[in-house]
């Protein structure tokens, strides 16, 4: 378990921004960080892929008002080159961008569709024992009727990279139940050096993509490749599922909301209050009204209608059921 001394280590934050939706989400992330953690002293990097042969269209943020607002909020736009993934697998941005961060400096990555809702400085990070988000469902793998099962699939990956499979297991969970096996949501992770961590993440992901073990036959890697490789990377550096106390990330201090209808449907009153407070200042409102989901869900009040469809203390167990109810009432937006 991370100790109290670890919480005093400085760190940088990285999110990924590019043209379109992610540019507005980047502004919202930066604004929520300044709102909820005004004394954060690290650097906030908005990693931005540049144009190149791996992109069909220029992915850079071109809206000057967005770029100016990011700067005003203390963010640093950090261009990087897509050499491996690009348009065919944009989730790979989070992997390739790590090499652009300052070498040897502690880092925390968040998916851009995240709100900071509390004091990041209170989190007892131990960057020498990395971790990642445990707010996930059993989305991968999907074992077939004739096998192999969860254990066989995951063990083949640990064996591929010379890792100790047995020590990764949660033996409080039954055999062949998905939570027995180390699995994260790749929307948050942290480590000691972005170059070292990122190179291993890249090596593992490319190996799995280009030469998957035979046990992965019939298993989809799109969009799951980052979440397949991430637990292997975390484990290889001595981290795991107990890297942080429960209830902080994806709890009191951050919210990976995914999209605004889901935020209003299932998140706490505090998260909704932070969202609506963060986008209220005129300088932010002028820019954010350019993003239709924010315009309709927040500024025009549609989000509160979504919220009224659900009892936040008794939500459907599966996210798909929440999505379906929102869609059937005509309120879905991405």
Image: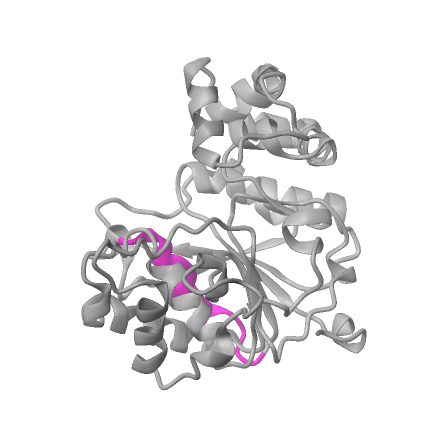
Q: Residue at x 23, y 68 (%)?
A: 215
Location of the N terminus by quadrant is bottom right
Please tell me in which quadrant of the rendered image residue 273 appears: top right
Q: Residue at x 58, y 32 (%)?
A: 263
Q: State the quadrant of the C terminus.
A: top left
Task: Please report the bounds of the magenta region as a residue range.
Answer: 89-104
Indicate the colouring scheme.
Answer: one colour
Mark yes or no: residue 290 visible: no
Indicate left or right for 233 with 144 as reference: right
Q: Main secondary structure of the magenta part?
A: helix
- Observer-nearest residue: 54 or 250? 250
- In percent of width and height, residue 24 lies at 51, 37
- Residue 287 sits inside the magenta stretch: no
Can you give x and y, in whole percent of width and height, for residue 309 in the image? 58, 17
At horizontal 56% and vertical 39% (from top left) the residue drawn is 257
Between residue 185 and residue 24, name the one nearer to us. 185
């Amino acid at each position: 378990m991370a100790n109290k001394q670890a919480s005093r280590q400085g760190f940088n934050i990285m999110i990924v921004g590019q043209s379109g939706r992610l540019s507005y989400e980047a502004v919202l992330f930066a604004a929520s960080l300044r709102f909820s953690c005004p004394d954060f002293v690290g650097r906030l990097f908005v990693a931005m892929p540049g144009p190149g042969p791996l992109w069909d269209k220029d992915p850079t943020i071109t809206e000057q008002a967005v770029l100016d607002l990011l700067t005003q909020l203390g963010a640093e736009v950090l261009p990087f080159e897509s050499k491996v993934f690009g348009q065919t697998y944009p989730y790979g941005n989070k992997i390739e961008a790590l090499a652009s961060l300052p070498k040897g400096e502690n880092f925390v990555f968040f998916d851009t569709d995240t709100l900071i809702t509390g004091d990041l400085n209170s989190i007892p990070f131990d960057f020498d024992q990395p971790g990642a988000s445990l707010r996930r469902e059993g989305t991968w793998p999907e074992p077939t009727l004739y096998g192999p099962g969860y254990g066989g699939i995951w063990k083949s990956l640990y064996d591929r990279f010379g890792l100790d499979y047995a020590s990764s297991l949660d033996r409080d969970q039954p055999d062949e139940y998905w939570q027995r096996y180390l699995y994260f949501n790749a929307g948050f992770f942290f480590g000691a050096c972005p170059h070292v961590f990122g190179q291993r993440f890249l090596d593992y992901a490319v190996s799995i993509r280009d030469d998957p073990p035979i046990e992965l036959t019939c298993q989809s890697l799109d969009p799951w490749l980052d979440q397949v490789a991430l637990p292997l990377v975390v484990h290889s550096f001595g981290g795991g599922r107990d890297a942080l106390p429960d209830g902080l990330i994806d709890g009191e201090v951050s919210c990976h909301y995914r999209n605004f209808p889901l935020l209003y449907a299932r998140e706490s009153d505090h998260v909704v209050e932070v969202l609506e407070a963060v986008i209220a200042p005129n300088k932010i409102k002028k820019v954010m009204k350019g993003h239709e989901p924010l315009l309709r869900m927040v500024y025009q009040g549609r989000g509160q209608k979504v919220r009224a469809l659900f009892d936040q203390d008794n939500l459907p167990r599966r996210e798909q059921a929440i999505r379906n109810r929102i869609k059937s009432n005509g309120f879905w937006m991405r």
